Image (spheres, grey):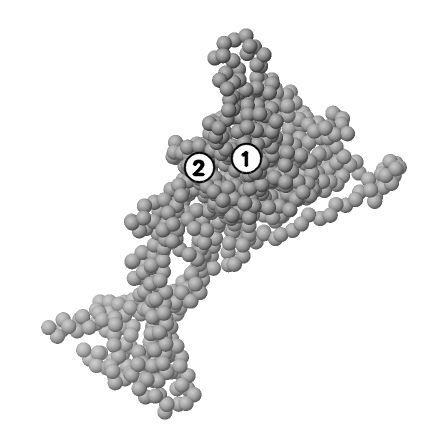
Amino acid sequence: MAGLRTFDAFPKTEEQYKKKSQKGGLSSLLTYLFLIFIAWTEFGNYFGGYLDQQYIVDPDVKENVQINLDMFVKMPCKFLDVRARDLTMDNKLAASELKFEDMSFFIPYDTRINDIREIITPELDEILGDAIPAEFREKIDMRMYYDENDPSSAGHLPVLDGCHVFGSVSVNRLQGELQITAKGHGYQSHIRTPMDKINFAHVINELSFGDFYPYIDNPLDGSAKFDKDDPMTAFVYHTYVVPTIYQKLGAEVDTNQYSVGEYRYHKDDNSMASMSLVPGVFIKYNFESLTILVADKRLSFLQFIIRLVAILSFVVYIASWMFILVDIGLVTLMGPKWSLRYQPDIASQGILEKN
Amino acid sequence: MSARRSKFLLLDVFSKTEEDVRVRTNTGGIITIGCILTTLLLLYREWAQLTEVVTRPQLYVDRDSDAKLALNFDITFPEVSCDILTLDIVDESGELQLDILDSGFTKTRCDQNGKELATEDYKMGTDFKPDTSKLSRGVGYCGSCYGVLDQSANDAVSPEHRVCCQTCDDVHEAYLDAGWAFHDGHNIDQCEEEGYVKHMNDHLHEGCRVRGSASLGRIRGNIHFAPGKSFITTDVERRGISHNHDTSLYYGHKELNFNHIIHHLSFGKPVDKSHEKLRRKEEDQSGISTNPLDGDEMRPDRNDAHLLQYSYFAKIVPTRYEYLNDKYPAVETTQFSATFHSRSIKGGIDDDHPTTMHTRGGTPGVFIYYEMSALKVINREQHAQTWSGFLLNCITTIGGVLAVGTVADKIFYRAQKSIWGKKTQ
């Protein structure tokens, strides 16, 4: 047992050989405060981590992608038709996957109307905080509020001049277009929407691709478009979707970002006639082949602790060094009386005073 | 001299305690040994990090637009014979590579279980070569074209100007030009005599494995495997050139279908295997480039398999790998992401997609649409750490461990002293 002693690299000095000074105590206090500050920032750095971006090509063959849509259109639901068309020439009857609810059209508070929104690039933490998966609620059957066969019984209801279209629709993961049109205009239908009913003033509450995370902010969320003078306007949105994976502390959110360009056609425009366009809302989409992987990386915890302690002890070391240097400076400039370290005891004071 | 020395002594911040006032303890020894071990472990980890190589991707805009893009593939069709199968490459410029004989394709006949029977160089349509020498055809023989070509004027003109279909091939060509269905050539004397009909029917239920590479333009296009010879019709009314296949023989046999196994499909130069080994194992099992279709097997259990059209949409991202090791030159390759789609050419709604109206028409087969991405990824290998960083980390590690040790030792020393008094030091 005694042999272990020789390995002791931390020799201790008995208390009686140590001296403590009041001034030293003050500088120690300052040092401790500084240490706490350093430790605080280091912890902050550790938890904040650093962002690492990778660009990967998806190794899986994909078939479909989900579009999450929630919008108000100023047209009764019975006249609305939603389809998705893409490179495969498939005609996706999206209307059968979406839910339609009659409503009285309104533009919610805090919606940007005919306006380009300010550009926000959400931070990783925001995305992760907002990534709460959800599903659209079931449709409310409005018929329970009135008798279908007796129009007068609907008198207590507000004027249902709008339609709430919401739900998730799965489309081919290819360049394509989601078309919201009036029945009988564009596609054949047994109903032909009367011209005076066509009005594609609309509010987009949510438009996103991939898993549905309602709280993640997308460029088109909370925007309204209408044209007072020409209800027959066709609104076209061009979106370019970039798959993005966010990773932090083991949590992973696989979602899609998109960029938007938008324009509109008017009935009187030559372009609308020549390109055989019909009024409606058209959301064109295309997908980027590269996936952005945004990962938050950090040191391992052990390494971090070692680093932290090393920095802290270094600070202590520097502090004591400074203390000694200041002390030496004071002693050489002002005389030994000013020494911070060695406060003269009474006996030596006598000697100093004699000199 | 001594005064000078004392001045320097004053500056000594590493002031030492005299040996006789120091106390050494057993716990101190244990902590020291523990510290040394921890330090060694951490230094080893630092060393491992120094030798570690990381890949840092950067995005660039692709500038080598002139270069041709190589296509490499190896696909087995277990239920279409090599005689029927054709391969065409069509790109957006309208460039049709219908005749890709010299591009170095091989096709291998195989039975339905994928067992290989014989390999030949790729030739359009059938590989049947008739032995014409045995045929007894008199001088002045003028074969019937079975109404495709107008032969009514033959009697009036000299023999050189007669319209004749001398061989089975001639009849086939004439049929294709007119857009007539040729089937397997039965009831056409030339074909029966040459043995073409027998040949086609004998091999009808074989499979086919196609391997090879071709070079493509760097624009949007498609590669497709379809049944029957392809031909072009110019449709004056629709002001378009359409590309068609003589699918008559395929449609005549409902048991044929385009089930397929993609053993390999990649764009860009094939990558040397030694480069693959260079890559670190744990993260990149896929190797140097992502080829998502490799190993893809499409054998759906559907009644209408005969009429299915399979489409793959590939978006190609040019990629360059740059290695740290100078021995290995940078590799220019590509990766692609793929989307799959299948539909019956009858169109309408199928069980897989209950809310989708598929379009009608088209040709059964396997279509691979490709498109280039404007962005290029350059993956650069880098050391995770520099030498100076490594040294600094080592020093920090040692210092940190020693500092922790000092604190621990002090705590133990104080604790021992207050518990057992001064006797046990």
Q: Is residue B267 above or below residue A350?
A: above
Q: Residue furthest bottom?
A: B423
Residue B1 quadrant: bottom left
Q: Is residue A60 visible?
A: yes
Q: State the residue position of label 2.
A: B121
Q: Secondary structure at mark 2?
A: strand
Front-lying residue, A216 or A89:
A89
Q: Amino acid at mark 2?
A: Asp
Q: Position of residue A146 (x, y in %)?
A: 85, 41
Q: Residue at x 54, y 57 (%)?
A: A251
Which residue is denoted by mark 1 in the rendering? B199
Q: Going by the image, does A216 lie left or right of B328?
A: right
| Rendered position, B406 above or below B225 | below
Subunit bearing disc 2:
B
Label disc, if present, on residue B148 of the rendered structure:
none
**Element assignment for label 1:** helix
